[in-house]
Image (tube, coloured by chain):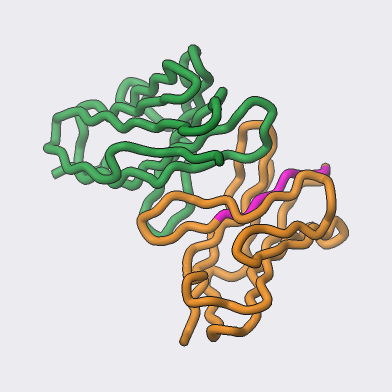
Amino acid sequence: GAVVSQHPSWVICKSGTSVKIECRSLDFQATTMFWYRQFPKQSLMLMATSNEGSKATYEQGVEKDKFLINHASLTLSTLTVTSAHPEDSSFYICSAKGQGAYEQYFGPGTRLTVT
Amino acid sequence: AQSVTQLDSHVSVSEGTPVLLRCNYSSSYSPSLFWYVQHPNKGLQLLLKYTSAATLVKGINGFEAEFKKSETSFHLTKPSAHMSDAAEYFCVEGAGNMLTFGGGTRLMVKP
């Protein structure tokens, strides 16, 4: 149980375009979902937290107009990177947490490359 | 502010020998602690969690960790390393929705 999927697993896009990444909890209801960014050989950096049906809460330094997060249902959250630039290239990982749970379950990650 | 320190950035062991990955946390109250494993280009998989129950926590794949409040430690151990254990390991402290990650320890397993 507690499986989280992400789609796509990798994506290449041109500078200036937008790309959407989906995060789904497959076998539980995720009241809270999280989006992280991971640079090579580094730990995860929290970008934002979202509760189903509410606006996301962004961490300091994360541009909310650039990284649009929608948590439309208890099983789906999306991250849209708008007007992507090469510096947005990174590994993006989502996680999900059920009501009353302590632990977060992580998706397999999405490798974004902006050319 | 919470902080989690993984004392070794790299650990190298031979296959079949014990594994010890060290972690210290900073919270003065009883924390929620986790160990996650990340294989290359993959997400994080939960190995085990401590949430103020038994201090010796058993996880998946033969891993276990012991919560020691007096030492503010939560070290991860495995009696016998397998080649498939080679990965990055993260010690994580949780408080509500906030996770504080250690810097990670890369475990290398030699044949």
Residue B21: name its quadrant: bottom right
Percent x, y of residue B10:
52, 73
Which segment did they paint magenta?
B30-36
Front residue of this view, candidates A60 and B97: B97
Asked if B111 appears above or below B72 in the picture, the reply is below
Compared with B86, A13 (above or below) is: above
Quadrant containing the C terminus of chain A is top left
Outermost residue, right side: B70
Above or below — where is A100 with respect to A113?
A: above
Q: Report the residue at 68% width, 77% height from top.
A: B79
Left/right of residue B16 with respect to residue A71 in the rendered view: right
Residue A104 appears at what percent x and percent y?
58, 39
Q: Which chain is orange?
A: B
Q: Main secondary structure of the magenta part?
A: strand
Quarter of the figure that contains the N terminus of chain A: top right
Q: Which chain is green?
A: A
Residue B86 spot, x, y in % from top left: 48, 71
